[in-house]
Amino acid sequence: MIISIGTDQKTKIVDELISQLKKRDYEIIYYGPKGKENLDWTQTTINAVKLVLENKADEAIVLCGTGTGASIAANKFNGIRAALCNDSETAAGARKWNDANVLALSLNNLNFQNLNEILDSWFTTKFLNDTWNKTQINILKKIESNN
């Protein structure tokens, strides 16, 4: 699986995220600073999300200070269902009921343990492909097609 990452800051959380993804044998495409410089969260999010839309990445993980801006930017794209997850239950719900394909994370509010719990839930929980949940996703797609 290929995961694109977009982040405006290179922090210890970002380093841990990359380490955890590599341990899970995911290929990573990284959009973010290499050092201490900050980048625009809008642009790093756009870069990561576009790879999902172009089928060059299976999913994306986008990060900024609160995670809110990255989540908002990602959700501007038709076909993207980004979920800001600060805990494992939210990550599981985003996958199970919302078929989320982009994980948004807060650089300010995560610790290593919380990050790993979120990743465990995100990558092990599958969409409940039943009639009711498919209907909900189809409603979202219909909203997108009217924009």
Image: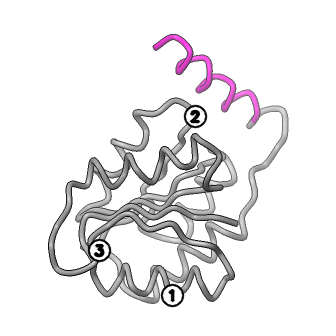
Amino acid under disc 2: Gly
Q: Amino acid at mark 1?
A: Ser
Q: Position of residue 116 (x, y in %)?
A: 53, 83
Image quadrant containing the N terminus: bottom right
Left or right of 142 in this view: 114: left
Label 1: few (<14), some or many (≥20) within 10 Å? few
Q: Counting other residues with Cα less than 10 Å from the Cα at mark 2, is it few (<14), some (14-19), or many (20 or more)? A: some
Which residues are drawn in magenta?
Answer: 134-147
Asked if residue 77 is among those painted magenta in the image, a careful observer would answer no
In this view of the protein, which residue sits in the foreground, 41 or 99? 41
Q: Is residue 64 above or below residue 10?
A: above
Q: Could you say whether the residue bearing mark 3 is in a helix, strand or loop?
A: loop
* Disc nearest the viewer among 1 and 3: 1
- The x, y position of residue 31, in whole percent, is 38, 63
The tag earlier along the polypeptide, 2 or 3, is 2
| Residue closer to the observer: 18 or 140 | 18
Toward the left, the furthest residue is 37
Q: Which mark is residue 79?
A: 2
Image height check: is 14 above or below 69?
Answer: below
Q: CA distance from mark 2 to mark 1?
A: 28 Å
- Magenta stretch: helix, strand or loop mostly: helix
Residue drawn at the location 53% of the way across and 40% of the way down? 80
Of the numbered discs 2 and 1, the one sitting upstream in the chain is 1
- Inter-mark Cα distance, 1 to 3: 19 Å
In the image, is residue 119 above or below residue 94? Answer: below
Q: Residue at x 76, y 33 (%)?
A: 134
Q: Quadrant of residue 41?
A: bottom left
Residue 98 in the image: state x and y as whole percent. 62, 44
> As shown in the figure, which amino acid type bears the numbered disc 3?
Asn
Circle 1 sits on which residue? 19
Q: Which residue is mark 3?
A: 109
Q: Residue at x 27, y 81 (%)?
A: 11
